[in-house]
Image: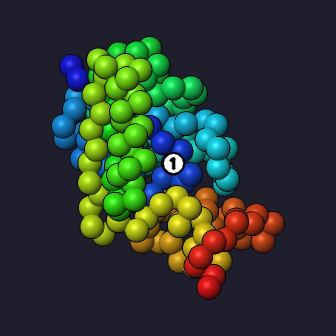
């Protein structure tokens, strides 16, 4: 049985993530969506909230599970008998980062393979930051996230208390 991990922040999970996870599930016996608990970036949702949103997303998919993790992805793989790390590539600028990360992971754990799936064209612009930024500015993210995620994002920004560091879409 070949198990794969799809690690990430998933803040929030969006249609691009979902596409990569479901495509990976066609290639491997099991895909574990591993929600990283302490990324070095602005987070809208707590680790537990992100995990809940991911689990709800894949509730009907028996080949995709979700869990929280800390530390090195390769150590998570070793501890959970996972042979493959799945990554998604959206745009050319992703490649250099993912390539360096794959080489580092291979150096740390040569027994664990890394594969990259190219995102579907309709999701190539999507990122968690883009979704959060659009939502924080009152934009409609209905087409980018599942309904349960939309409800949570809408609620999070509804009272105006949550702010998101806006970079580009306001211009």
Mark yes or no: residue 146 visible. Answer: no
Residues 139 and 9: in front is: 9
Q: Could you say where residue 11 lies in the image, as x and y percent from the top left? A: 56, 51
Hey, which residue is sitting farthest right in the picture? 161
Mark yes or no: residue 91 visible. Answer: yes
Residue identifier under label 1: 10
Q: Quadrant of the C terminus?
A: bottom right
Q: Could you say where residue 33 lies in the image, as x and y percent from the top left? A: 42, 37
Q: Quadrant of the N terminus?
A: top left
- Relative to 38, residue 96 above or below: below
Q: Secondary structure at mark 1?
A: loop
Hey, which residue is sitting farthest left in the picture? 27
Q: Could you say where residue 40 lies in the image, as x and y percent from the top left? A: 64, 44
Residues 81 and 148: in front is: 81
**Which residue is located at x 37 percent, y 19 percent?**
109
Q: Quadrant of residue 50?
A: top right
Dot 1, crowdedness within 10 Å: few (<14), some or many (≥20)?
many
């Amino acid at each position: 049985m070949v198990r794969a991990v799809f690690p990430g922040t998933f803040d929030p999970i969006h249609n691009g993530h979902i596409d990569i996870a479901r495509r990976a599930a066609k290639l491997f016996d099991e895909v574990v969506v591993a929600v990283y608990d302490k990324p070095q970036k602005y987070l809208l949702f707590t680790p537990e909230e992100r995990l809940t949103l991911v689990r709800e997303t894949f509730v009907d998919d028996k080949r995709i599970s979700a869990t929280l993790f800390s530390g090195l992805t390769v150590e998570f793989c070793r501890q959970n008998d996972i042979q493959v790390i799945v990554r998604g590539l959206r745009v050319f600028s992703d490649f250099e980062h993912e390539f360096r990360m794959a080489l580092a992971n291979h150096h740390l754990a040569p027994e664990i393979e890394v594969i990259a799936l190219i995102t579907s064209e309709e999701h190539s612009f999507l990122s968690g930051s883009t979704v959060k930024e659009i939502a924080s500015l009152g934009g409609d993210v209905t087409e980018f996230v599942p309904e349960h995620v939309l409800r949570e994002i809408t609620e999070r920004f509804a009272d105006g208390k949550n702010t998101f560091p806006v970079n580009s879409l306001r211009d």
